[in-house]
Amino acid sequence: MLNRARDQRAIPKLLGFGTQSLTVFIEDVEAHFENAKSFGVAILEDLHETVYGELQYGAEDLDGHHWLFSRHARDVSPEPWGATVSRTQRS
């Protein structure tokens, strides 16, 4: 459940910096992006494909929280974008 902050609580707009970010995975992120733009949502990142294979865009809500809306676009090997795969051994 999401709710608006009470007047006494610090929100990113009042603090001047982000306090968290949330990613929501959506099947039709393209339509979601167009719908958000049509309602005047503050778009922080236009819809784009990331180096790690996600199609996503970023938006800001009225309190200044940042949201990423995303869907998996393609499988990408981690090495080209600088990630490493960690493997743990089980005993």
Image (tube, rainbow, N blue to C red):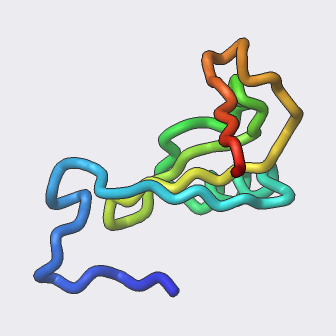
Outermost residue, front side: 91
Q: Position of residue 54 (x, y in %)?
A: 75, 38
Q: Position of residue 80 (x, y in %)?
A: 72, 12
User: How many labels sit on residues?
Assistant: 0
Outermost residue, left side: 8
Foreground residue among 27 and 46: 27
Picture residue at 35% right of the left edge, 82% below the top: 4
Picture residue at 78% right of the left edge, 49% below the top: 71
Task: Determine whether, in the image, residue 19 is placed left or right of residue 88.
Answer: left
Q: Is residue 44 above or below residue 28?
A: above
Task: Determine whether, in the image, residue 75 is placed left or right of residue 63.
Answer: right
| Snapshot quadrant of residue 85 | top right
Q: Position of residue 11 (x, y in %)?
A: 23, 66
Q: Is residue 79 above or below residue 5?
A: above
Q: Position of residue 73 (x, y in %)?
A: 85, 38
Q: Is residue 86 above or below residue 72?
A: above
Task: Determine whether, in the image, residue 57 is placed left or right of residue 62.
Answer: right
Picture residue at 70% right of the left edge, 23% below the top: 51
Outermost residue, top side: 80
Foreground residue among 35 and 76: 76
Picture residue at 32% right of the left edge, 66% below the top: 63
Task: Determine whether, in the image, residue 86 is placed left or right of residue 63.
Answer: right
